[in-house]
Amino acid sequence: MTTTALVSLSALRKIYNAGQPNEQEVLHGIDLTLQPGEFTALIGPSGSGKSTLLNILGLLESASDGVYRLNGDDVTLLDDDARTRARHATLGFIFQFHHLLPAFSALENVMLPAMMGGEGAQADTRQRAEGLLDAVGLRDAYHKKPAALSGGMQQRVAIARALIRAPRLVLADEPTGNLDTRSSDGIFELLRRFNREQGTAFMVVTHDPRLAARCDRIIELVDGRIATDRANVPVT
């Protein structure tokens, strides 16, 4: 029985300012497949197109050319409303700067994507949010505002928020980039634990070779092209 690829990109290109004197092609014909449950590192020098690729995968930007299939569905030409629905149904996001809402408690920040998805402040949504905060070690922080939490704790809230809708794929853009080594290791181990226990696929952009070495697959992007794509035996 063949498993449908979670992500399939074919000849994907991204051009900014097309037809203008300052036209710039950032991605040059990317072919890429991600399978359910994969834990992948995306590495490469600054300016190689990593964030642009992640934004396209996250349906935050559109490709200029090529085909993008998500969960087997062609999402290349969806309108904004359909893209939003597909994003909410399948994807979660973790960023280097966690973007927590300062006026909301940790619990409310975690619940927010579910509420925006139309689930409201239902009891089961709150229960899921509490369970995720428990899982990331923040049982005592439900009602604390972000300003009362350390950077590592805020990133743990962001992880819980990314998982509230049980996404099949989480896109993480330098999720440990502003943390110290100890906090980085703790955050990364949380991602790996959710990957193992829930089967959530992750694509993690990182400049840290230590963290990339702990992934199952490493994709290197150079000048908007995939330079290498290899399976990896994770360092434990």
Image (cartoon, rainbow, N blue to C red):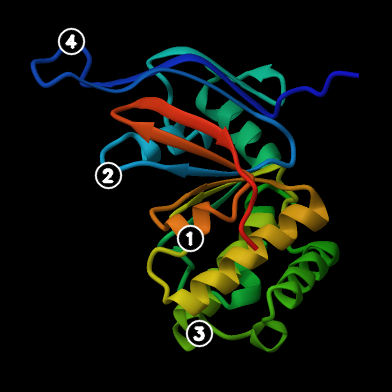
Quarter of the image with the C terminus is bottom right
Residue at label 3?
149
Distance from label 4 to label 2 (Cα)? 25 Å
Mark 4 crowd level (few <14, some 14–19, many ≥20, 10 Å Cα): few
Q: Residue at x 54, y 79 (%)?
A: 153
Q: Earlier in the sequence, mark 3 or mark 2?
A: 2
Q: Is residue 160 left or right of residue 148?
A: right
Amino acid on which the number 2 mark rests in the picture: Ser
Q: Is residue 120 left or right of residue 220?
A: right
Residue at label 2?
46
Which mark is nearer the camera, 4 or 1? 1
Amino acid on which the number 1 mark rests in the picture: Arg
Q: Earlier in the sequence, mark 4 or mark 2?
A: 4
* Residue 210 or residue 201, whichever sits in front: 210
Circle 3: element type: loop
Residue 56 coordinates in the image, percent (x, y): 46, 31
Amino acid on which the number 4 mark rests in the picture: Gly
Q: Earlier in the sequence, mark 4 or mark 1?
A: 4
Q: Residue at x 78, y 55 (%)?
A: 196
Residue at label 4?
19
Residue 125 coordinates in the image, percent (x, y): 78, 62
Residue 65 visible (yes or no): yes
Q: Which mark is residue 210?
A: 1
Distance from label 4 to label 1 (Cα)? 41 Å
Distance from label 4 to label 3 (Cα)? 47 Å
Amino acid on which the number 3 mark rests in the picture: Leu
